[in-house]
Image (cartoon, rainbow, N blue to C red):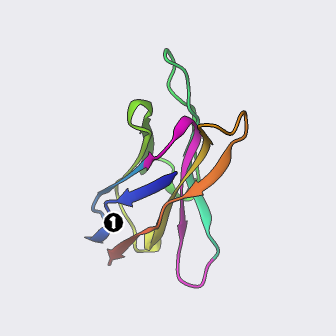
């Protein structure tokens, strides 16, 4: 199983970016997905998470207080993908953003494992 993230870049304060991440491989089910970030000299922190939901009800979401009202996490279960729409970006949002997924691979019974993307750099200039 691999997670491939994309969409980072350089943006001015107040601007927007959209991050994408797709899981690929022998996947039976993708459970929770999330975005984390790590700024220079700081610990990795959870930015937003989303559960798998059902066919009728989308996944429930949760956000760090620092991004509430500015960031929106969403997912496409058919594509095993998760997205992070980031608006009103601030210089303090500058970090490497990592996608995360809790995945049940094919052929391992009911076991699920944590997988991480390679990280994508978001730089917000003032």
Q: Is residue 6 left or right of residue 58?
A: left
Q: Is residue 125 left or right of residue 101?
A: left
Residue 15 image offset from top left, x and y in percent: 27, 62
Can you say whether 56 is above or below 82 in the image? above
Task: Tell me the quadrant of the picture where the C terminus can be found.
Answer: bottom left
Residue receiving disc 1: 8
Q: Nearer the viewer, residue 90 or 22?
A: 22
Q: Residue furthest bottom?
A: 41
Occupied quadrant, residue 17: bottom left
Q: Nearer the viewer, residue 105 or 32?
A: 105
Residue 12 seen anywhere in this rendered image of the structure: no
Q: Nearer the viewer, residue 64 or 39?
A: 39
Q: Nearer the viewer, residue 19 or 70?
A: 19
At 71% from the left and 34% from the top, the residue drawn is 109
Residue 8 image offset from top left, x and y in percent: 33, 65
Can you say whether 113 is above or below 123 in the image? above
Residue 41 among those drawn in magenta: yes
Crowding at dot 1, Cα within 10 Å, few <14 / some 14-19 / many 20+, comes out as: some
Occupied quadrant, residue 5: bottom left
At 52% from the left and 51% from the top, the residue drawn is 1
Q: Is residue 31 left or right of residue 77?
A: right
Q: Secondary structure at mark 1?
A: loop
Can you say whether 119 is above or below 108 in the image? below
Image mark count: 1
Residue 65 image offset from top left, x and y in percent: 59, 54
At 59% from the left and 37% from the top, the residue drawn is 106
Residue 44 among those drawn in magenta: no
Q: Residue furthest top?
A: 56
Name the dominant secondary structure of the magenta segment.
strand
Residue 2 image offset from top left, x and y in percent: 48, 55
Residue 83 seen anywhere in this rendered image of the structure: yes
Q: Which residues are magenta?
A: 23-42
């Amino acid at each position: 199983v691999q997670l491939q993230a994309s969409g980072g870049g350089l943006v001015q304060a107040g601007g927007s970016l959209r991050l994408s991440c797709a899981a690929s491989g022998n996947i039976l089910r993708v459970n929770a997905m999330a975005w984390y970030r790590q700024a220079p000299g700081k610990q990795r922190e959870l930015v937003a998470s989303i559960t798998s939901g059902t066919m009728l009800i989308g996944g429930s979401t949760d956000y760090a207080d620092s991004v509430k009202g500015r960031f929106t996490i969403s997912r496409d279960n058919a594509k095993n993908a998760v997205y992070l729409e980031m608006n009103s970006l601030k210089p303090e949002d500058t970090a490497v953003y990592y996608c995360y997924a809790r995945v049940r691979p094919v052929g391992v019974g009911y076991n699920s494992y944590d997988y991480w993307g390679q990280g994508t750099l978001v730089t917000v200039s003032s």
